[in-house]
Amino acid sequence: MTAYTATVTVRLKRGVLDPEAETTKGALERLGFEVDELRSADRYELDFDAADADAARSRADEMAERLLANPTIHDYDVDVSER
Amino acid sequence: MTAYTATVTVRLKRGVLDPEAETTKGALERLGFEVDELRSADRYELDFDAADADAARSRADEMAERLLANPTIHDYDVDVSER
């Protein structure tokens, strides 16, 4: 078993309203920053052991699909590296 | 002016309690996944125009320091790319 860190980034699908991002963009503009667009995402870094990188990636995919992301509104991507 | 996307990742400093991450880790374990550690972070992707990459980076740094991150409890990093 090798120690891996999987980084799962969960973002809203295009077209899904993101009031948090709109609020943050408005606050930046009130501070004087010009921003064309702001997208927010959640990022999870997970440490676990797996037999190899493929096994680590498929484990992280399964965690994203079963808990971290809601497939109705979210896209996610997974990046795996050895610790 | 060139169009840039700055990615700002905001994470809790080591030692700051993260109840959301603990809850997520517990939920994954109840689903049968073994996880040694889970860290959560917020990720912001900001689109804006700047004269060059250095200007874009310093603008994103300033946005992180003034609004996106709380320097008492957060670390952040900035990554800038042309759109």
Image: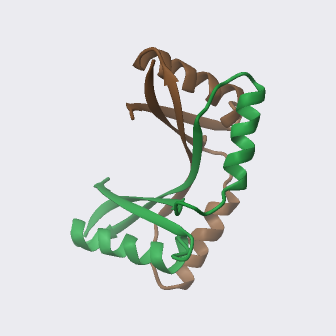
Chain colours: A green, B brown
Q: Position of residue B38 (x, y in %)?
A: 52, 61
Q: Between A51 and B40, which is closer to the camera in this rendering?
A: B40
- Tally the numbered discs: 0
Q: Is residue B18 left or right of residue B28?
A: right
Quadrant that contains the N terminus of chain A? bottom left
Taking depth in this image into account, of B50 and A79 the one nearest to the observer is: B50
| Residue B14 visible in this rendered orientation of the protein | yes
Confirm whether residue B69 shows in the render. no
Q: Quadrant of residue A61?
A: bottom left
Camera-side residue of A36 and A50 = A36
When the figure is inspected, residue B61 is found, relative to residue A7, above or below; the finding is above
Residue B13 in the image: state x and y as whole percent: 60, 40
Residue drawn at point x = 30 percent, y = 68 percent: A57
Q: Is residue A14 above or below residue B9?
A: below
Residue A26 in picture, x, y percent from top left: 74, 37
In the rendered view, tell whether residue A77 sits above or below residue A83: below
Asked if B44 appears above or below B6 in the picture, the reply is: below
- Which residue is at a point 76% across and 35% down the rendered structure image? A27
* In this rendering, position of residue B10 left or right of residue A31: left
Residue depicted at 47% across the width and 66% down the height: A75
